[in-house]
Amino acid sequence: MRSASVVHAPSYEDLFQENARLKEQLERAYHQLRELKHHVFGRRSEKLAVVDASQGVLFDFEGEAEASRNEAASISVASHTRPRRGRQPLPKDLPRERIEYEPEERRCSGCGNEKDKIGEEVTEELDYVPAQFVVREHVKIKRACRRCQDGVAIGRLPAEVQVIEGSRPGAGLLAHILVSKYQDHLPLHRQEQMFLRHGIVLSRKRMCDWIGKLVEQGLWPIVEAMKRELLQSTYVRADETEIQVQSAEKSGSLHRGYLWGALSLEGDVVFTYAPSRAGAVAEQLFGGYSGFLQTDLYAGYAKVYTPEGATRVGCWAHARRKFVEAEKTAPRECGKVLQKIAALYQIEKQARTLSFEERQALRQRQSKPLFDSLQKTLQDLQLHSLPKSPLRLAIDYTLSQWEALTRPLEHGCLELDNNAIERQIRPIAVGRHNWLFAGSERGAQWAACLFSLLATCRLHRINPFAYFADVLRRIHTTPQQRIADLTPRRWKQLRETTPAS
């Protein structure tokens, strides 16, 4: 006869632990569902919602609700000048065509004399003239002595005439193609159709060949000079973005590459293409750099931050984003943290026009107490949050890099976040919806070169067409030791200091 098996009932402690585990899993699943719905249907803005501080909360966390309201009420908003409303004046440097209209009655009805002009009223009309192609004929005159029938001489073309040896495009046409594709996100096949409307046959293959020759024979050394100056800068901000690249091994297939972007304190932007996001790429790009390097917490940069290498600066935009994402499951706790971060950014608005020394002094007076208060709040919330909850993950993310996040207190040149380089990456993300992918890794390297020049032009408010139209004519006549004068930043400085002829 078989004995019946004994089934032990779970203890209260086992049930309690199982309930806590299931509760934590449910909270994570609920958070993921909310994030997915927000990503598909919600707004992408991370602006802090304005909450009425006079309304209390249902459960006061250790009496801190009143303190949070008081702190929120103490945040001052800096005054600003509202832009002029209504119609804006037209630029004065636009070409103007004057058409005069005389009154029908030009003689006085009383005495019969011709009326004198006493003034005028001007009505401005903004019109558009379609782009025009110009064929510029460079004629090399031949001369010889009729008497001796010898000594034939022929004129020589200046070196800047043929931007691409053996090709017909002028600097203006090439500048237009570059800006249209890499700044205005018009793929070459669309430009091909636009040129056809003017009766000009330019195939996308030919334009692609022109771009490759411009980059490899002229523009690449300029970006290399920018990269050398960037690595000598005191402060660099870095980030990376994806780019789809057509595979050379298998026709029609794509693989994921990356554009690694870096922005120097002086305002040079350099993009570098790499086929991966491995830490070896970061080590190759920033190996030997010993200044301040601001990135997110991506582990790929770990080898760069050594005692002899770069000093890491944290990004408050990434830390803040963690609390924005966790706000759905812990609105009160995250709201307190976000209010304190907002107060820090209000101080930064005041510091924007100050020198680095004045900015550092202001941060020590006003920002440091806020940092200390925020750190204590995070440490208190850490003790009362579930280990794997979104709130706890946000807190751990922030506290794990607290020294790097507070480094701007000691150095006035540093910023709280990495948004400046992210703003330069954003146009690339817009362009991906138009040109979709790079045709090859070589093409991705060309794009990185041109994105570097265009982003730097944009940062220094340089008309990119004017820059390329000038530089493409001068690049083959500029000595190698002076190639840095053709970088957008130096190009603008030289034009501002050189008197117009």
Image: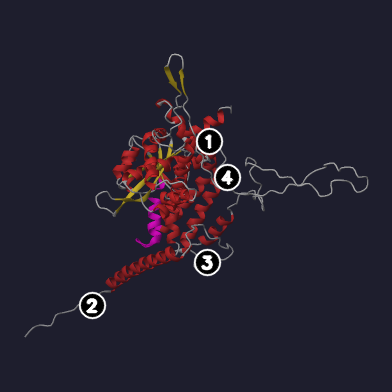
Instruction: Identify the image quadrant of the N terminus.
Output: bottom left
Of badges 1 and 2, nearer the viewer stands 1
Q: Position of residue 129 (x, y in %)?
A: 58, 47
Q: Disc 4 residue type? A: Gln
Inter-mark Cα distance, 1 to 3: 41 Å
Q: Disc 1 residue type? A: Glu
Span of residues in magenta: 382-403
Of badges 3 and 4, nearer the viewer stands 4
Q: Which residue position holds label 4? A: 350
Check if residue 400 falls in the magenta segment. yes
Inter-mark Cα distance, 3 to 4: 32 Å
- Please, is residue 295 above or below residue 229 in the view? below
Residue 316 is at least partly visible in this image: no
Q: Which residue position holds label 3? A: 57
Inter-mark Cα distance, 2 to 4: 65 Å
468 left or right of 18 in image: right
Farthest-out residue, front:
147
Q: Count neighbours of disc 3 (C-alpha within 10 A) and say few if under 14, some if 14 to 19, many if 20 or more.
A: few
Residue at x 42%, y 19% (from the top left corner): 152
Q: Position of residue 288 (x, y in %)?
A: 34, 34
Q: Which residue position holds label 2? A: 9
Instruction: Identify the image quadrant of the C terminus.
Output: top right
- Regarding mark 1 in the picture, which secondary structure is present there? helix
Q: Picture quarter containing residue 231?
A: top left
